[in-house]
Amino acid sequence: MPPKMRTPPGPAGLTVFPECDCSTPITAKHPLAQSNPARSPEENAAMWARVIFNKAVSLGIDVVIDGEELLAFMPPRLPPRACSWFAHWLGEFREEIADLGQAG
């Protein structure tokens, strides 16, 4: 049975779980680690490139692939710190993002 939640007085939205019964044994049916197989570095890079690209597009950043060059047009409403963050990480994953553009 899951522990009952209660909201104590204090900051709104803070949920406290009382002590729970952690005596469930770890068996072969319930392995502790490796519930998801490890990804290769290439799969990780492709996944993060997709996440960063999708977030950039959702914020209104136009990402254009022009030959070997990746261009990112930042909207003026985006804070300078966010612009530099996206410029850095879009550049880091330039090849993977180019692959996304060719696949899509």
Image (cartoon, rainbow, N blue to C red):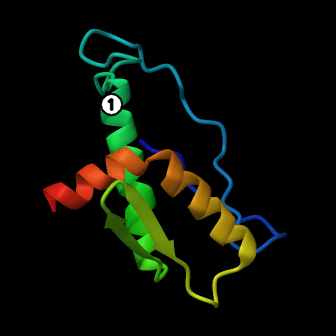
Say which residue appears at 50% left-offset and 19% top-offset: 23
* Residue at the spot 64% in from the left edge and 82% down from the top edge: 78
The residue wearing badge 1 is 42
Q: 12 and 73: which one is in front?
A: 73
Quadrant that contains the C terminus:
bottom left
Q: Where is 87 relative to 89, above or below? A: below
Vertical comparison of 23 with 73: above or below:
above
Quarter of the rendering containing residue 53: bottom left
> Residue furthest toward the top?
28
Asked whether, in this view, residue 15 is left or right of residue 24, the answer is right
Q: Which percent across, then down, holds residue 96?
A: 34, 46
13 sits to left or right of 68: right
In the displayed image of the protein, which residue is found farthest to the left? Answer: 103
Residue sticking out furthest to the bottom: 77
Q: Nearer the viewer, residue 27 or 100?
A: 100
Pick the quarter of the image with the N terminus.
top left
Q: Which residue is drawn at 33% across and 65% down?
A: 66
Residue at the front extreme, as displayed: 67
**Place of residue 15 in the rendered image (x, y in percent of width and height, measured from the top left):** 66, 60
Dot 1 amino acid type: Glu
- Measuring from the top left, give residue 24's x and y in whole percent: 43, 20
Question: 100 or 1, which lies in front?
Answer: 100
Q: Where is residue 102, by image quadrant?
A: bottom left
Q: In this view, does 79 lie to the left or right of 64?
A: right
Density class for disc 1 (Cα within 10 Å; few <14, some 14-19, many ≥20) is few
Q: Is residue 89 above or below residue 55?
A: above
